[in-house]
Image: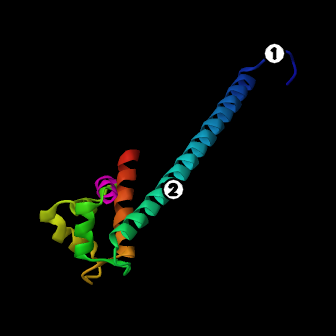
Amino acid sequence: DSDGSISIEEWEEAIEAALQTKLNQIAAERARKRAQAKKERDKYAAEVLVLARQVFAMLDVDEGGTLSHDEVTNGVENDEDVVKFLINCGNADLAALLKPKKLKKALEELDVDNSGEIDSEEWEAAVMKGLEKRMAAMEA
């Protein structure tokens, strides 16, 4: 009120205004960090999907657009890049392709439409499921 002294009410108003400004700054910083983290997760997911498509193409030696039991078996036995991807993808069904005793069951789990082969949509769905699981674990 420009009387040369600060009343309790004026002091409380100033403190509340300063606190509100600080809270707004903190909220804006949290929102910025969340947006940055989402951007990084989305970029990572896109990179994993590109890699998954490359691995699918490496396995699909007859270029038929699907993966047969023989193609998967050959890939996991003979292609180091395929093996690395399957180990690190985060999906138990995909990782099980590396275990001969679990290979048939894993192929059945991945073959959602029961066609006897894994198409690119089934492959990518499995990869994304594993990716989501890994990202959730990282955020926990």
The local secondary structure at tag 1 comes to loop
Residue under the image location 25 percent in, 82 percent down: 114
Query: What amino acid is labelled 1 in the image?
Result: Ser
The C terminus lies in which quarter of the figure? top left
Q: Residue furthest top?
A: 4
Q: What label sits on residue 126 in the rendered view? A: none
Residue 30 screen position, x and y as percent? 57, 41
**Residue at mark 1:** 5
Q: Would you say the magenta stretch is mainly helix, strand or loop?
A: helix
Pick the front one: 102 or 8: 102
Tell me which corner region of the image, top left, top right, bottom left or bottom right, holds residue 52.
bottom left
Q: Residue furthest bottom?
A: 115
Res 110 seen here: yes
Query: What amino acid is labelled 2 in the image?
Result: Asp
Report the mark closest to the observer, 1 or 2. Answer: 2
**Residue at mark 2:** 42
